[in-house]
């Protein structure tokens, strides 16, 4: 078969959103293969044609000047939200809005995972989309995908969208 193109995915979101759990599902690999980058709390995983870089966006603002190393050549941005953590919707919305302003991520498709849908208190993806004004995004392809990283529901649908919107 033809050699696979490496797909560079950036997986970002607040701490505790569920990035690590989603990464594990996306990469279909053991967490042992996820290597933290020394001093930066950035994790990387490479798996069958995918290269994923991920970190907690809120707590890492002090290293913002180094982000460009990871932003370079990004094919797709995956932004993870804890749908049950309503206290932090504003914070996560602000962080996402800032990311969408990053010059290096201009035009990069963004998939937003409305994670933790298995919890009874989870907000619906459509309500999160409205609350975060996602419908004002006009400079790139975007999608909000409800999911539960815990039981896996919706994660594959998100990956399918990603694969349709790269390159
Ligand atoms: P990260 O800090 O964004 O990497 O978040 P983690 O993947 O470490 O997840 C944070 C916590 O949320 C852990 O206790 C996970 O087990 C839990 N978690 C992640 N995804 C889900 C989900 O879909 N549903 C539920 N109920 N818990 C989840």
Image: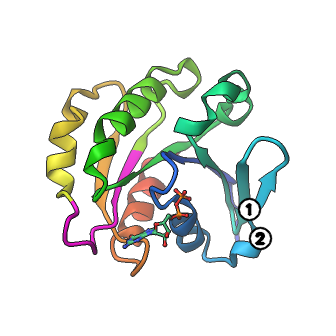
Residue 52 placement: quadrant:
bottom right
Establish if 103 lies above or below 56. above
* Residue 3 shows in the view: no
Does label 1 point to a residue whose CB lies under 8 Å from ligand 1? no
Percent x, y for residue 145?
A: 30, 58
Magenta residue span: 111-122
Whether residue 132 sits left or right of residue 63 in the image: it is: left
Query: Local crowd at mark 1 within 10 Å, few (<14), some, or many (≥20)?
Result: some
Whether residue 147 sits left or right of residue 1 in the image: it is: left
Residue 147 placement: quadrant:
bottom left
Sequence order check, earlier mark of 2 and 1: 2
Establish if 37 lies above or below 68. below
Q: Are marks 2 and 1 in contact (CB under 8 Å)?
A: yes
Task: Judge whether residue 27 is colored magenta.
Answer: no
Whether residue 158 sits left or right of residue 106 in the image: it is: left
Establish if 51 lies above or below 118. above
Query: Local crowd at mark 2 within 10 Å, few (<14), some, or many (≥20)?
Result: some
Establish if 139 lies above or below 23. above
Q: Which quadrant, please, contains the C terminus?
A: top right
């Amino acid at each position: 078969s033809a050699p696979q193109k490496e797909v560079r995915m950036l997986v970002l979101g607040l701490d505790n959103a569920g990035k690590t759990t989603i990464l594990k599902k996306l990469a279909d690999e053991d967490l042992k293969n996820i290597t933290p980058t020394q001093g930066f709390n950035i994790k990387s995983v490479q798996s069958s044609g995918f290269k994923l870089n991920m970190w907690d966006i809120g707590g890492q603002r002090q290293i913002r000047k180094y982000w460009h190393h990871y932003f370079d050549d990004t094919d797709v941005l995956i932004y993870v939200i804890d749908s049950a953590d309503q206290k932090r919707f504003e914070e996560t919305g602000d962080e996402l809005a800032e990311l969408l302003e990053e010059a290096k991520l201009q035009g990069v498709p963004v998939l937003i995972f409305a994670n933790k849908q298995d919890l009874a208190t989870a907000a619906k993806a459509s309500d999160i989309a409205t609350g975060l004004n996602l419908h004002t995004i006009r400079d790139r392809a975007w999608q909000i995908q409800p999911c539960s990283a815990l039981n896996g529901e919706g994660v594959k649908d998100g990956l399918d969208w990603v694969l349709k919107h790269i390159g």
